[in-house]
Image (tube, rainbow, N blue to C red):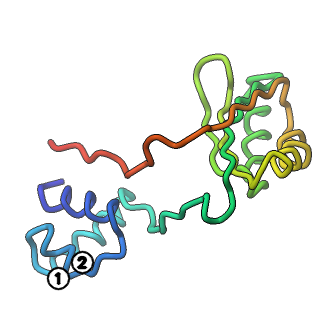
Amino acid sequence: MDRADIALLEALQDDSSRSLAQLAELAGVSSSACHRRIKALEDAGIITGYAAQVDSGRLGLKLQAFVEITLTSQSREAMDRFEAAVGDFDDILECHLMSGQADYLLRVAAIDLEQYDRIHRDCLARLPGVSAMRSAFAIRRIKRWQGYPVPRG
């Protein structure tokens, strides 16, 4: 990746709704070169999609929970079953396989504790192979995710 590719990745992560002309200007290339570069970044799997950043609080989802999950077994089969089941629940926003005490870390958003209780009973408690579950609630977001830092050579 050269300077123009780095500029495009940073600009798209900052605001992917910019026009091709604006992106080309930021990257210091022509519009057609900009289009080719973006397509090449998509084809290489570096750009995997485009999405809007949404304010969860304005959607009424004021509660953010992080749930540590420990499985009864760390066999490949047990992990595969758990990971497949996670994909079946829209209430689970993210799932990460972790090192350390917990096997997985999940992120869940809810309107309030009552809805989180429903998610806990109807979703989290139905996940296969869980031996322990610990929830922690975010009090306040300090820094919002802004995209990945792009390595410079």
Q: Which amino acid does label 1 sit on?
A: Ser
Dividing the picture into quadrants, the one containing residue 113 is top right
Q: Is residue 135 above or below residue 5?
A: above
**Circle 2 is placed at which residue position?**
35
Residue 86 on image: x %, y %: 75, 47
Kindly identify which numbered label has been placed on residue 32: 1
Horizontal relation, residue 43 to residue 28: left or right: right
Q: Are marks 2 and 1 in contact (CB under 8 Å)?
A: yes
Instruction: Please count the marks in the image.
Output: 2
Q: What element carries label 2?
A: helix
Residue 9 on image: x %, y %: 27, 59
- Residue located 60% across and 28% down the image: 98
Q: In terms of depth relative to the viewer, which is nearer, 142 or 107?
A: 142
Badge 2 crowding class, 10 Å Cα cut-off, few under 14, some 14 to 19, many 20 or more, is some
Q: Is residue 60 above or below residue 62?
A: below
Q: Which amino acid does label 2 sit on?
A: His
- Residue located 28% across and 67% down the image: 40
Residue 136 on image: x %, y %: 69, 31
- Residue located 18% across and 53% down the image: 1
